[in-house]
Image (cartoon, rainbow, N blue to C red):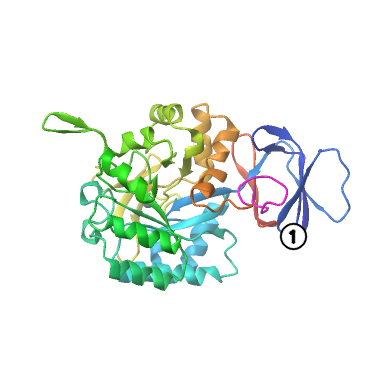
Amino acid sequence: MKYRIHGGSLVTDTVERADLLISDGKIEAIIPTDAPSPREYEIIDAVGCYVSAGFVDIHQHGGGGADYMDGRAEDFYLATSAHLAHGTTSVMPTLLSADTEGLMRAIGGYKAALSDPRIKANLLGIHIEGPYISPKQAGAQKPEHIRKFNPEEYTAIADFAEGNIRRWSVAPEVEGAADFAKFAEKRGIALSIAHSDADLDTAREAFRLGYRHITHFYSCISTVTRRNGYRVAGLLEAGYLMDGMDVEIIADGSHIPPDLLRYVMKFKSSERIALITDAMRAAGQSVSESFLGSALDPLPVIVEDGVAKLTDRSAFAGSVATADMLIKTMLKIDTPLPVAVKMLTVNPLRMMKLDVNKGLLKAGYDADVCIFDEGINVKAVLVMGEVAYRA
Ligand SMILES: [Zn+2]
């Protein structure tokens, strides 16, 4: 199909009125709104709307009542569809700490999802969050599934995944992290630091080994501690001090309150920030009770005030955010729209080395496009040049 997205304001480095020509899955050209176009282009009306690159979520556990740990292609369909309606055209399905069998089941689901014609969103590869993390920063990850690096296990998991693991979030202070870094490099897996109690020196050493990203900055990471009276910096400080270290933030407005979001935007280059949902299964649903992880190994949670919490309300247990909510949150703290959009499109793709011809509204790039109104309500979504969602 050939489409002309007409009359909208294109969000690139700036916001300007122009039309987008799309053919063969690619952005063909950006042309003036009043320029004539050949007849064969079907017009998509975007008058009064913004038109941006499709949103990219590199940390998402589920949505629409499904969790990727459930491990069926159906679950991938339900979750990606729920998020597609909120503008997410590309997703990295994220797996929680589980036993080997649980991880394998979810990976099997991902492989089945790759050939499921109902799934419209781009599947960018699997993100595994755990199980080689610190029990001291477990958050909502089940303690019984947390363990030391096990080369036999991670090799078997990666072999079974057949090249489909693109990202792995682990704690670099856990025994075996250096060998794991070598392994990840060989397999083309991006390393992130997550659920970690590492100090700044350990973070520096980890960066040298290839750990270039901090998973959900502020959540389940170390900060300043005292050793015999002396202050020691942690991962939070590492994120700010190390210019080359990327961070991702759950911009649902709850995990990091508005003033702290302002603080992140003030002291970290926005080029090094990705917005993520970290959404669990209740995202895109209106429920007050849900559970985290696989239905076979569930952790009950309550959903209130727009966030998932452990039942004793002692901690958050993932978000119920969708991509449009992240944009809204960032606009509320006066982030310019083009900057917010970059943090949810090209930045995460660049961090995962997946930004080749993807994530920008530019001729020759994949036609992943999101059309939304002034209130950031998603009106239409195109994936690889085809209409995948219409409000
Ligand atoms: Zn997560």
Give the magenta part as a residue range: 358-369
Q: In x, y percent, where is residue 294?
A: 35, 63
Image quadrant containing the N terminus: bottom right
Q: Amino acid at mark 1?
A: Asp
Q: Is residue 127 above or below residue 345?
A: below
Q: Out of 335 and 45, give the one closest to the viewer.
A: 335
Count of labels in the image: 1
Quick check: 98 above or below 82? below
Q: Is residue 258 above or below residue 58?
A: above
Residue that mark 1 sits on: 24
Q: Is residue 67 positioned above or below 14 on the image?
A: below
Task: Tell me what residue is drawn at x 25 percent, y 40 percent.
Answer: 199
Tell me if residue 176 can be seen.
yes
Can residue 220 be seen here? no
Q: Is residue 97 left or right of residue 135?
A: right
Q: Does the magenta-highlighted stretch encompass residue 43? A: no
Residue that appears at 25% across and 56% down: 142
